[in-house]
Amino acid sequence: MHTRVTRVPFLAATIGVIALFAAGCSASGNSASGPKAEPKAAVSPQQALLLAAHNSESVNTIAADISVQATTSSGAVSIAGTIAEQLHPSVTADANFSTFNVGGQSVAGGLAEVITTDGVYMKFAELAQALNTTKPWVEIPLKSLGATGSALSSLLSDASSENPVTQTELLAHSKTVHKVGTSVLDGVPVTEYAGTYSMSQAIAALPANVRSTLAKEFNQSGITDAQFKIWLDAQQQPRKIIVTDSGSAGTSTVTETVTSFNQPVSIQIPTSGETYVVPASALNGLSG
């Protein structure tokens, strides 16, 4: 396969995995229709985010609108669409990016992804054409990506228990987190907080078995810290989150706006009959 053709779709898959993981970890909360914590008066920014972390323990499903704006060595990347994620009993996510632009070129048909702890499935016309397959879905098994795939699989598996709390606690432990002000988001009164956190803090919050692999990825990207904004409602449920990071390899801004908590989501895993599995030999140097 031509390197340019294969690396662009894989970049899309990687961004999808990271964005979905961020949504599952950072934009979690109680169901709008389920039991809610009593509103807390005069809480500090750190306390507000710790309460949001506590609320995230009861999240089983989440849906959100998402956009990703990034600059990479391949050019600018602009992605927008929707995601739906199931956290229990295992992590499964579905993403539909109707807007997908790379290097100033729009990809016809956009990109659809289904992500499990075992692999990433993509419906992406350019990738299917490059692989000379008529099957609508292409699967990249995480086991074919070596240490990188193992790290992503472990992160996605762990998201159903530890990481939704860990990620929000990470924001709460930011040394610079502060209250920005209040506003109304989609008809809901919210309080906005902002701050920064270091990549060393982020790595320390990860499961021990994936720290070294992802630390290497962070070091290669040159990213040392990230900026965040988060909007919480009166029950300390995250309604919106924006995370921006930059490094020698590029910059990215991921924005998620939560549309539902703990509501039914339908995620269909592509069948073997409609899926082309990319062989490990075709992934070139992408494995860790």
Image (cartoon, rainbow, N blue to C red):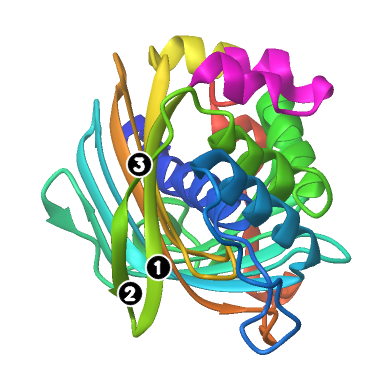
| Quadrant position of the C terminus in the picture | top right
Secondary element under disc 3, as helix, strand or loop, is helix
Q: Nearer the viewer, residue 287 or 178?
A: 178
The residue indicated by pointer 1 is: 190
Residue 6 in the image, given as x and y percentages of width and height: 41, 40
Secondary element under disc 1, as helix, strand or loop, is strand
Magenta-colored stretch includes residue 109: no
Kindly identify the amino acid type of the residue bearing the numbered disc 2. Answer: Leu
Please give the name of the residue rendered at 81% of the width and 44% of the height, measured from the top-left corner.
Answer: 162
**Residue 229 visible here:** yes
Instruction: Tell how many labels.
Output: 3
Q: Nearer the viewer, residue 194 or 246?
A: 194
Q: Nearer the viewer, residue 55 or 63?
A: 55
Residue 181 in the image, given as x and y percentages of width and height: 29, 55
User: Residues under labels 1 and 2: Cα distance?
Assistant: 7 Å
Please give the name of the residue rendered at 60% of the width and 33% of the height, measured from the top-left corner.
Answer: 170
Residue 78 in the image, given as x and y percentages of width and height: 23, 52
Kindly identify the amino acid type of the residue bearing the numbered disc 3. Answer: Val
Q: Earlier in the sequence, mark 1 or mark 2?
A: 2
Label 3 neighbour load within 10 Å: few <14, some 14-19, many 20+ = some
Give the magenta-colored segment's residue range: 198-215
Label 2 neighbour load within 10 Å: few <14, some 14-19, many 20+ = some
Q: Earlier in the sequence, mark 3 or mark 2?
A: 3
